[in-house]
Structure formats: C-alpha cells, structure tokens
Amino acid sequence: MTAAAPMTNLLNLTRSELEAFVVDALKQPRFRADQLWHWLWRRGARDISEMTNLSKDLKGKLAECAVIGLPAVDVVRTSRDGTIKLLLRLADGERVETVLIPMGEHYTQCLSTQVGCAMACTFCSTGELGFTRNMTMGEILGQVLVGRAHLAQVGLGALKNVVFMGMGEPLMNLTELLRALATLGNVEGLSIASRRSTVSSVGIPHSLKILGDSGLAVPAISLHAPTQELREKLMPKAARVPLDELLACLDAYPLKQRERVTYEYIMLGGVNDSIQHAKQLVRLLGQRRCKVNLIGYNPPPPEIAPNPPYRAPDPAAVLAFQEYLRSKRITTFLRRSMGQDIAAACGQLKLLEG
Ligand code: SF4
C-alpha cells in the first residue's frame, strides 16, 4: 500500500506558487488561482467548502489534496489596556503567541516567527524556552488571519501594521520571513505595505543585507546596550557580531525617503539606564539617520519568574535618559509597555497557559 501524498497547506504558497499549483497540479485555468487567492487572503476562508464561486469539481479536487492550515486559537486574554494576546496551536501541536496592540482606532499585530528562540537574551522570557523550530510562511501569516478575524468578530478596529517582534529571531528564519513579507504586501490579498511592516532583529549582518535588498521591510534593531562590553552581558549570542560591524551594516541599509533605522533599547533598572549610558549611546549613534525607542523593562509575572533577573527602571531615570538623547538631537520615543498584566509585553511571551 502506498502512503497518501501529504496535503498542501494553501497558506504556505506564495502568489506564484499558488498559480503553479492550480495550473500544473490541478489542471485548472489561471483565473482560478485569482479566485482562490481572494478567498484565502481577502475573505479569510477557513474551509474550501466556503468558496462558493468555485465549481463543485474543483472544490472536490482541492479537498482531496489541500487544506487551509490556520492555527487554532487555544486561549484569548485581554489586558486592561485593550491589548489582546492569542495563544495559538500549530498543526503539529507546537504553540506560539501573537499580540494585538491597540493604536488609536487601529491595531498593530506582533507576530512570532519561530517556536521558541535560540538567542537567549538574558532579559527575555522567550529566550528561556530555547529553540524548537522555525515557523512556515503559512504559520506566520496564519497569525494575521486569525488576528484579523478575532478583531472583526469582537467588533474592534482594523489591523493596520505588523511588527515581527514576537517569539523568535526573524532573521534566523529568513526564507520564510521574506516569503511572508512578500505575501503580506500583495495588494490582492492582505495588502499590508512594506512601510507598515517592521522586522525587529538583534542584527545579523548578512541577513540584513538580503532584507535591505528585498525592500520589503524596515528594520528595528534590538540594541539594548551602548557598548560592546555591556551588550555581551545582556545578549551574549547576539553580541557575537561586534557593534561596529553591526552599525556599519545598518549605515549601508537602503532606506527610502523619510525612513530611518530604529534602535530598540530596553531599559533595565540600574543596568543600562544611567545618564552615563545615555552619553555612551549618543557617542555610538551620533549623527546616524535613526530613531531610538526606549522600552521600560517588564519583570515577568511571578508565576513565570519568581525571581526576575532585572528590575523595572525608575521612571525618573527613563525620562532623564530620553531628555538627554533628545537634547543631542536623537529622535527618541518612549514606548508604552502594553499588555503587562497578561504577560503580552515585550520580552514576556512565554506560553503562559502552556
Ligand atoms: S529578545 Fe528576541 S532574539 Fe532575544 S531571546 Fe527574546 S525573542 Fe529571542
């Protein structure tokens, strides 16, 4: 007896791959790919049977060899500030988290790209999980489909922006990330333009070069320390790339008009939040075309970490730090930590309900 051929997850196919699948494997005319694409990415179909304008014959053929492999929503938690965290189960039972963050009338979705993470940054709950596997394009974008559907179901605002800032280091999953970014921007589908997609990374030069050449997203670099020495303590794996090499790579990043590289700086109480550190950061970033996002560290809830390794910064220290950077003409924003009470804030994603 021969083993059954594996089912194709339609969400794993880029626009051109879907067309090849429809024409070559299903022996259907090209326009059927347009219809399928519309059902998958515009209408958010959950089952092939919903695709009412496809012939019965085609739906039958599809049902024999393909599925719409959406992640299952296991748990939904809503923060007092309106942030929503979805705990998702993938087809093989692995679980990841995605977060919907209210931004005025609209939402920004924080997406995971890996199950766990290999980078082991010392302040990050995800890093403690270790690395399990990369997510596929269909799994990465499946988060957007279920996130969008959840917002519509509960009558909230539309999803406008995405940030690849959830579980995992996106540039360690570069192939699937690039496929996901290209699909996100497809105007017949999700239509989330490159200026609305931010890829957050610790900074991997050769992958940043490829991302830059693709023109598909702007990077936000997890800097978190103003010196190589301190970065080695906070992010030992990421700091294997020396800071001067990383910054040289970012200086060469092809930016469109009005785009800037963002540097993320998580403020850890008593560790990297003094004026001395602010001065070092000014020396490092100097005249670069950039902006800095300051994020106050969120100690994980006690059920995750009874003895967190760091403490939250003193609010006065954060303000003084920001003021100093601004006085030196570095555009600096204070990012409000959202979803702290449901462990959805930066560095807190750790499969709490798992
Ligand atoms: S901060 Fe990002 S790169 Fe570092 S361990 Fe956490 S998820 Fe991984």
Image: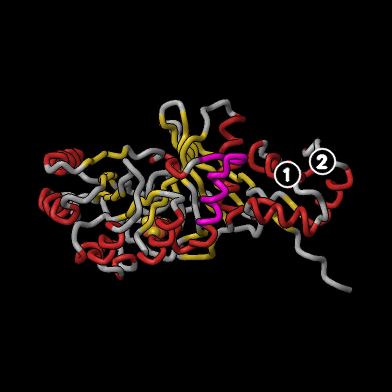
Ligand 1: give its quadrant: bottom left
Label 1: state its secondary structure. Answer: helix
Question: For this view, does 272 lie left or right of residue 190?
Answer: left
**Where residue 201 appears, x then y in whole percent?**
38, 56
Label 2: state its secondary structure. Answer: loop
Q: Earlier in the sequence, mark 1 or mark 2?
A: 1
Question: Residue 80's image quarter?
Answer: top left
Q: CB atoms at circles 1 and 2 under 8 Å apart?
A: yes
Q: CA distance from mark 1 to mark 2?
A: 8 Å
Membership of 259 in magenta stretch: no
Question: Callout 1, which amino acid?
Answer: Leu
* Magenta segment boundaries in residue numbering: 177-192
Mark 2 = which residue?
54
**Where residue 320 appears, x then y in whole percent?**
14, 40
Question: Residue 235's image quarter?
Answer: bottom left
Q: Looking at the rendered structure, which numbered label has been put on residue 36?
A: 1
Question: For this view, does 109 lie left or right of residue 11?
Answer: left
